[in-house]
Image (spheres, helix red, strand yellow):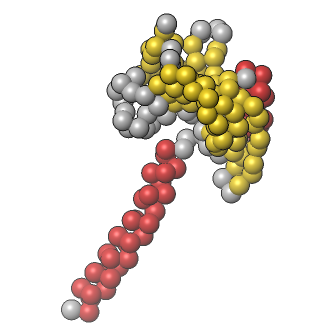
Amino acid sequence: MLFHKKILSVAFAFVLIVLQINPVSVKAEHYKYRCNSPEAAEQAKRLLEEKKFFVDFCSNCSPSAANLRRVEVESVTTQTNECGIELKVKGKLVRGIKPPVFGGECLETLEIYNPSLSLNLEYDKTIDLAYTYIFDSSTKSFITMAQAVGLSVEEICVKRLQMKK
């Protein structure tokens, strides 16, 4: 009987540990490239300052939560924390569109109509390079910042955004 109580106690403790760890691992998967090496962060910062705008699109979000926003960059700062270097962007949200743009399926290229809803809202956010897209003149589409700075994009759901008029 004592043996069974020990097994149940150990099993209960294991379940508690899993319940505490699991939300953290899910959150970590959602933020693929929020924390970066100093080299990747510096490259991304330079690109954002040079391009002056980017498209913020969460391809890992549920279709009902996904949104597409064009952001005009005013400033980019870096901050170091326990996981690496994060980039914080301040700017203006100038265009946005809500689904049905995105059906939730993973695609190499997502073709969308140029967002038409005009906004003029403050944008102050720590970005994830996996969901920050910049214009790439060689492909004439928006690619992820992760790809632009040479990080792996295999696990990113939507790798390119192709704007249509």
Q: How many marks?
A: 0
Question: Which residue sits at x=61%, y=25%?
Answer: 94
Relative depth, front residue between 101 and 2: 101
Relative depth, front residue between 86 and 147: 86
Question: Which residue sits at x=46%, y=62%?
Answer: 21
Relative depth, front residue between 141 and 56: 56
Q: Quadrant of residue 95?
A: top right
Locate residue 143, reporting x and y percent: 58, 21
Locate residue 138, reporting x and y percent: 64, 8
Say if 84 sits above or below 19 in the image. above
Say if 64 sits above or below 102 in the image. below
Question: Which residue sits at x=24%, y=85%?
Answer: 4
Question: Which residue sits at x=66%, y=9%?
Answer: 137
Locate residue 42, reporting x and y percent: 78, 35
135 relative position to 110: left or right: right
Q: Residue furthest left?
A: 1
Residue 142 is at least partly visible in this image: yes
20 relative position to 131: left or right: left
22 relative position to 140: left or right: left
Locate residue 29, reporting x and y percent: 49, 46
Residue 153 is at least partly visible in this image: no
Image quadrant for the N terminus?
Answer: bottom left
